[in-house]
Image (tube, rainbow, N blue to C red):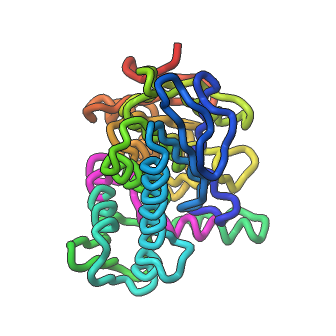
Amino acid sequence: MHPPPASLNRRRFLMGTAGACAALGTGGWLWSQPRSWQVFRQTSHALGSAVTLSVWHRDAALAEAALDAAFAELELVESVMSIYRPESQLSRLNQNAVLDDPHPHLVTVLQFATEIAQQTSGAFDVTVQPLWELYHNAKKHNRLPSEAEVMQARALVDWQRVKITPERLQLDGAGTAITLNGIAQGFAADAAMAVLRRAGVAHALIDAGEMNAIGGKPDGAAFTVGIQHPRHADAFVSMAKLQDRCLATSGDYETRFSDDFVHNHLFDPRTGHSPTELASVSIVAPTAMAADALSTAVLVLGAERGMELVRRTPGTDALLVSKHGRITATEGFPLNA
């Protein structure tokens, strides 16, 4: 499921212009609001995506220290879960099929992935890495894999092959491999948010590929973010308001293996091919990890079954865009009217 690091740019959101600061720096005072509120912003790179953390606070030293601590936490998450770092715990697990004394972060993510897999009858499956490798390698030779190759790779995909305890992680079956591309960025955003909250930050916007809002703006308004249009890189499907909620999008446009969007980095574990109904799914949920995983799961499930899943998941709303451009949203999706 992973594209090369240079091209990774999944679930991209752009801040709306209303109330947003135009400058993007590496930190420091950018502008002030009445009663000495200031916004501090730092931008870096983690888990294959640009990450921007914005904090509103009256205390510059506290805000900068909180941002530094949040980025340190993001680096920790990447050191554990990056598939591109050969020394990461995920890479070692994929290589050796076993990992003793795993970091609690990795255990948490895999346990949650298992829960989503169970809820979706395997539509969300972190063991689709063999399919990604197959398509990625075929693209290097300007071709698509044959159906026989797809079926061979699909036979290696089964979330039940992942055995999880706090003391040991194990992959059963030769060729089993994990990708966390559909969940790690959400977890990373949640981890950064937790650090900022512990530092006393009550107003922040986290863009780590997924969006987390701590509170809203100091004046009480919600943050406004744009959701990328799946067919027009310079356009939004819609604007959304976030306040103490998280938002993630999965789309067929992020990394594709054919120009017609039919073959892309999202795989249906049951077929070995990309889902055919939806172009993108945006999920709003209490945590970014849930929004991240559910956006992939719903895209694989399709509109009818996906909406059923959303409606039975507390605190969750969805906006779907079909391959034909039809937009459907739950009643509670926080559209910016």
**Residue lying at 45% horizontally and 31% vertically, measured from the top left:** 303
Horizontal and vertical percent for residue 144?
A: 70, 62
Q: Tell me, yes or no, if residue 247 can be seen here.
A: no
Residue 172 image point, x, y percent: 32, 78
Residue at x 68%, y 45% (from the top left corner): 261
* Whether residue 326 is situated above or below residue 104 in the rendered picture: above
Q: Is residue 116 above or below residue 137?
A: above
Residue nearest the observer in this picture, 214 or 128: 214
Give the image quarter of residue 304. top left
Give the magenta part as a residue range.
114-135
**In terms of depth relative to the viewer, which is nearer, 261 or 193?**
193
Residue 105 placement, left or right of 66: left
When the figure is inspected, residue 155 is found, relative to residue 265, above or below; the finding is: below
Residue 58, how many percent across, how many down? 44, 37
Rendered residue at 48%/31% (across/down):
37
Q: Report if residue 265 is visible in the image.
A: yes
What is the residue that sits farthest to the right in this orientation?
A: 142
Q: Tell me, yes or no, whether the highlighted magenta stretch contains residue 90.
A: no
Q: Residue furthest top?
A: 337
- On the rendered image, what quadrant is the N terminus found in? bottom right
Q: Taking 134 as reference, is 94 left or right?
A: left
Of all residues shown, which one is farthest toward the bottom? 96
Q: Identify whether 93 is placed above or below 70.
A: below
In the rendered image, residue 129 lying in the magenta stretch gets the answer yes
- Number of on-image labels: 0
